Amino acid sequence: MDTFVEKTEYEFNQRTFEYCLSILLFIFLVLVHSFFQAPIYANDILANTAITTPALIKNIGVAKGVTDTELLKSQFNERVASKYSGWNVNTVADGIKYVKMVKYYSGKPVRINIVEINETVAQDYEVKPAIASKTLPNKRTIRTIAQNTNSVAAINGGFFKPQTGVPLGTLMIDGKMVTGPIYDRVALGIFDDGYDVGRVQLDAKIVGNGQTIKIDNINQPRMLSSYILLYTRDWGAYAPASPQYGVQLRVEGNKITAASANPLSIPENGYVLVGPKSELGKLFGAEYVDISISTNPKWENVRHIISGGPYLVKNGAVFVDVNAQRLQSIGGRNPRSAIGYTKYNDLILVAVDGREGSSIGLTLYELAALMQSLGCVNAINLDGGGSTVMFVNGQIVNRPQQTGGIALSNAVVVSKKTNN
């Protein structure tokens, strides 16, 4: 027992000595660090617990007076330069690039024109749809549409009725629903902070006399006599003819101001409903009517919508749903137009020439693979064939079948912002 006690006491003293020595050494190192290193401030501790390489680069940039916008611009330029290495990349404006390339499919050439936009960097510009004139039944060349909207770049937009120029499918401009969807075709929504893609359905109704009546579409040609269609001044001065056994109701300020079987004039701040009397007659005598219009998906705060079809890329994978969107007639190898966006919110516009020996065009699956290779997480087909045309810096940059391109109903433009 005595021997055991003595050994324990010796080990305790040794450990105490080592512990004290460690404390002294730690104090010495702290003093040395204080004399030879810059002081650490509270802001430094709050800034980062672990500095990653991107964060370090950003901190260096800020230290040199580089703004966030300049950093984003540099990153955008680097992405585009890397993606199109070997091709001539032209700067249209900050955040807007134009690229022209030739690729080979089955040993034959295809001319491809591409515009990439990062709206965060291109702060003086916005991407939006534009129609040919103040009313829908009109057509203009893309040069005219681009000039009228003060645009530095433009591409043809969605499908339209060739005889009249009325867009066929969802079209929203500056938050106003210009035309409704057809066959729930896919569309691209443009928001303040990015983009989304989905097959769009209309959810619209009018309530009056205790009745709720479905509205089937907005500013679209009639497909069924049973449909109830809503027409605004975007359509023109008068609503189209009523269907057999049909009626028209003019609504201004939530009041029905006229009813007739014949075409009614469309008010500036109202609309005309056209449909079967068996349904719209339920609103006769209503003191007050209320209308609601929304879409599915519920795109809250969406600024613009441009439709097309079919899908090309969905959630990063090639996805071409031609049959589901009733677009079997646009198959084969043709001139093509497309729009999509990347994980960096870079918007990509593509115009592909076709139907000639120097550029044979693409199939929809080849176009989908191209959009995927450009980094699109979602992309859709736009109107193509004779409609395919791209405008950059005052020039038609592709070679449409008709010189200058055919007259179009609508386009996607990159326009200079106006000061409101």
Image (cartoon, helix red, strand yellow):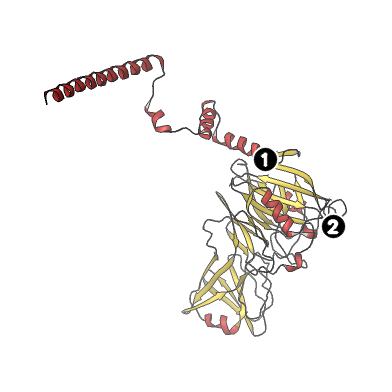
**Residue visible at 59% across and 64% down?**
200
In the rendered structure, which disc, 1 or 2, sits on the residue that comes first in sequence? 1
Q: Which of 147 and 404 is in front in this view?
A: 404
Name the spot of residue 112 as percent of width and height, x first. 77, 49
> What crowding class fits label 1: few (fewer than 14 Cα within 10 Å), some (14-19), or many (20 or more)?
some
Query: Crowding near pointer 2: few (<14 within 10 Å), some, many (20+)?
Result: some
Q: Which amino acid does label 2 sit on?
A: Arg
The secondary element bearing badge 2 is classed as: loop
* Residue closest to the far left: 2
In the picture, the quarter occupied by the N terminus is top left
Residue 391 tag number:
none
> Quick check: marks 1 and 2 in contact, CB under 8 Å?
no
Give amino acid for label 1: Val
Percent of width and height locating residue 357:
88, 53
Residue found at x 30% / y 18%: 27
Query: Label 2, on which residue?
Result: 355
Residue 125 locus on image (x, y percent): 64, 44
Residue 406 falls in which quadrant of the image?
bottom right
Q: Can residue 151 be seen in this view?
A: no
* Front-most of residues 151 and 377: 377
Q: What element carries label 1?
A: helix
User: Where residue 167 sits: x, y (%)?
Assistant: 70, 64
Residue at image position (78%, 44%) is 101
Q: Mark 1 points at which residue?
A: 80
Observer able to see residue 196: yes
What residue is drawn where x is 86% and y is 50%? 358
Separation of disc 1 and disc 2 at Cα? Answer: 29 Å
